[in-house]
Image (cartoon, rainbow, N blue to C red):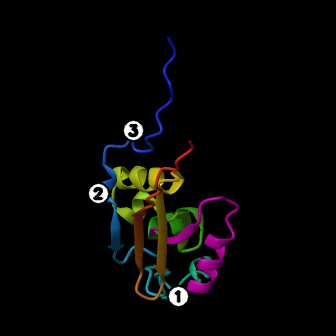
């Protein structure tokens, strides 16, 4: 006896679709011009590798070759120092660092991959806010008789 795969995109999620339906804003989660960067103690200057603009970060995130849109998140000062990296990193728009939990990450991912929901986001790099809107697409059943 074989089991049919489920059509429920939320089958393996801990959250139901109700937890993410509507518009949710995650404040101060994106890379901004005010993102903290390291400073050399002796000179008081920010290292060249940690100097970056929002436009540069946005272009970097948009340039990721993926079917899922990416956003620019701030990199920790520790990561910037240890890896001599830029002050931003790219991640999918519903990444747990932006949405605050793995449960939300999985739920947004399920909705994004599903034909049942429409998912849109707005990344406001001026304020650092990320807004995600999830709506259920009502598709009336067709009469095939």
Q: Which residues are magenta?
A: 53-76
Q: Nearer the viewer, residue 88 or 100?
A: 100
- Residue bearing the label numbered 3: 11
Residue at the front extreme, as displayed = 145
55 magenta-colored? yes
**Nearer the observer, disc 2 or disc 1?**
2
Q: Is residue 21 above or below residue 77?
A: above
Q: With 79 as the anchor, is 22 left or right in this view?
A: left
Disc nearer the start of the sequence (3/2) = 3
- Residue bearing the label numbered 2: 19
Question: Could you tell me which residue is drawn at 47 percent across and 56 percent down?
Answer: 139
Where does residue 12 sit, x and y in percent of width and height?
A: 39, 38
Disc nearer the start of the sequence (2/1) = 2
Question: Could you tell me which residue is drawn at 39 percent across and 38 percent down?
Answer: 11
Mark 1: give few (<14), some (14-19) or many (20+) Cα within 10 Å.
few
What secondary structure is found at the residue carrying circle 3? loop
Residue 25 in view in this figure = yes
Q: Is residue 84 above or below residue 5?
A: below
Quadrant location of the C terminus in the rendered image = top right
Label 3 to label 2: alpha-carbon separation = 14 Å
Disc nearer the start of the sequence (1/3) = 3
Q: Are marks 2 and 1 in contact (CB under 8 Å)?
A: no
Question: Could you tell me which residue is drawn at 41 percent across and 57 percent down?
Answer: 96
Q: Are marks 3 and 2 in contact (CB under 8 Å)?
A: no
Q: With 11 as the anchor, is 81 left or right in this view?
A: right
Mark 3: give few (<14), some (14-19) or many (20+) Cα within 10 Å.
few
- Residue bearing the label numbered 1: 45
Quadrant of the image occupied by residue 69? bottom right
């Amino acid at each position: 006896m074989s089991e049919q795969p489920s059509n429920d995109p939320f089958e393996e999620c801990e959250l139901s679709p109700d937890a993410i339906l509507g518009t949710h804003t995650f404040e101060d989660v994106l890379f901004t011009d005010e993102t903290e960067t390291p400073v050399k103690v002796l000179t008081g200057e920010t290292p060249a590798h940690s100097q970056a603009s929002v436009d540069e970060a946005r272009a970097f995130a948009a340039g990721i070759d993926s079917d899922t849109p990416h956003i620019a998140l701030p990199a920790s000062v520790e990561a910037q120092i240890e890896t001599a990296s830029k002050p931003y990193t790219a991640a999918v728009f519903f990444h747990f660092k932006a949405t605050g939990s793995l449960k939300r990450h999985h739920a947004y991912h399920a909705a994004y991959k599903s034909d049942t929901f429409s998912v849109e986001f707005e990344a406001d790099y001026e304020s650092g806010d990320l807004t995600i809107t999830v709506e259920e697409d009502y598709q009336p059943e067709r009469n095939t008789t």
